[in-house]
Image (cartoon, rainbow, N blue to C red):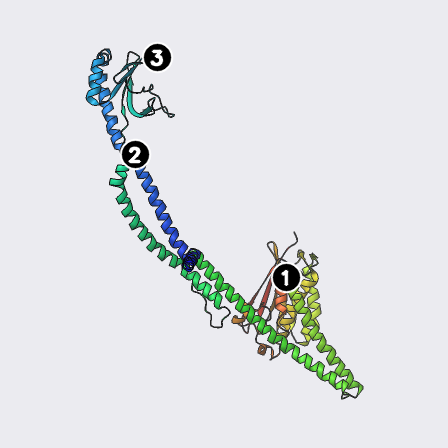
Amino acid sequence: MTVTIKVTVTFLQAMFTSLRSRLWLSYAFVIAIALSIVAVVLLVFLIRNPVLSRQTQQQLSNVKTVILENPLRFVRSPNLLQEISQANDVRVLVFNANREVVVDTNPEKPQIPFPRRTLLNRDSQTTLDTDGKAWLYTFSRLQTGQTLVVAAPRPRVAVLNIFADQFFMPILEAGIIALLVSLILAFVLSRWVADPLQKVVVAARNYPSEDIQQVTPHGPREVQDLTRAFNSMVGRVHASQKSQRDFVANVSHELKTPLTSIQGFAQAILDDTASTPEARTQAALIIYNESGRMHRMALDLLDLARLEAGTADLQMSDVDLKVLLQGIVDKFTPQARKANVALRLNVSTNLPAVTGDGDRLAQVFTNIVDNALKFTSPNGTITLSAKKTGVEMEVSVADTGLGIPDDALPYLFDRFYQVDPSRAGGEKHGAGLGLAIVKEIVEAHGGKIGVRSQAGQGTTFVIHLPLVK
């Protein structure tokens, strides 16, 4: 017995914790409440019985009309009022100017008060006698200053009999039909809502599976939004995992070469293979250069982590971009001449200052110009431009180099991403962190960066920075 009770309780708990079951039961509950409200309204309607009340009110008006045809005759002859009262089963009262009853065809019954008006200054049609019994009445003021009142008990019905004979079965039948329809409708709607959510749950449980597919949005708009958000999250996680795998491969490759060189030349010094001073100097120089390369990579990783975490220490001040860009051009002019590439500066006059960290902004343009020189063929051109556009400063670096493939543009600023190295003669440049750092620096300044490129026709990086307030 105890086991049966536990199983039943467990089943009920599982049923009430299921979204589908809750939706199913909620619709049934709503239908039950709606039917109860309808039943109460109909019951109140029957209790008040407006049809019989109107019939009684019409009868009272007819009696009053007969009396008002010759009011003095009836008022002076109470016997006539008694006859018309008994003939029509009504009660006739006459009040004097002091609101005192002077004629009452049924004096043995509880007293009826003088006619009153409602809050809206309209003649009331119901009143209560001294015993609390409800009466319907109509009245009229006579020329003698008296008030004629014709009243009758408000019709009442046997509520329980009506409910049992006329009301219970229709409500019961309608309730059963409505309940069945609501359960079917609730089942369909619960499937409509719960099935897409269940697919999301299954996909989340199976993640990270290699063969996981995006969940097709179905159901209500909110559920579809949740499904799209889940698909987007899965896509971002996949991209992040891929970029991390690529990063590990790239860093492993980048570290392998300098570590091999360092290890080999250090072994040569230890084994006295590099016996001459020149050989030892060459070995030490290679060890120094390769360790510096590893050190720069570590600094780039640390720099990117701080920028992404928002903990980088930016020294904000007014920056003259014309001076900053001129310094970049002067810095790369020897390298550009060696590569036979023209390096130009096109800056508007009276250029306003921007708020930023001068060293970080210099790092941005240094990285972009350095990349442009690597991918620009001899006799090419690199142009640095700056102009004011509204409340922003627009800075662009355009080259006439190899360009970037369309399929690479969306990932250009991703961490660890590298365009096909064969485009630069099979040579790799860094670990794919430079442009990711550039993007983080620009966004840390409240700006944005974009790129336009077409394979074989060059690339243009466009940076928008806010002006000094």
285 vs 95: above or below:
below
- Going by the numbered disc 3, the residue's amino acid type is Asn
Place of residue 407 in the rendered image (x, y in percent of width and height, measured from the top left):
52, 71
* Residue behind mark 3: 98
Which badge, 3 or 2, comes first in the chain's sequence?
A: 2
Q: Residues within 10 Å of mark 3 (few under 14, many from 20)?
A: few
Q: Select label 1 or label 3 by which is in front.
A: 3
The CA distance from mark 3 to mark 2 is 36 Å
Q: Select label 1 or label 2 by which is in front.
A: 2
- Residue ID at (64%, 65%): 305
- Going by the numbered disc 1, the residue's amino acid type is Ala
Left or right of 373 on screen, residue 87? left
Q: Secondary structure at mark 3?
A: loop
Report the residue that reaches farthest toward the right: 277
- Given residues 467 and 352, the one toward you in this image is 467
36 vs 355: above or below:
above
Place of residue 166 in the rendered image (x, y in percent of width and height, measured from the top left):
25, 40
Q: Residues within 10 Å of mark 2 (few under 14, many from 20)?
A: some
* Residue behind mark 1: 309
- Residue ID at (42%, 55%): 16
Q: Is residue 220 visible?
A: no
Which badge, 1 or 2, comes first in the chain's sequence?
A: 2
Q: Secondary structure at mark 2?
A: helix
Q: Secondary structure at mark 1?
A: helix
* Residue behind mark 2: 47
The quadrant in which residue 383 appears is bottom right
The quadrant in which residue 377 appears is bottom right
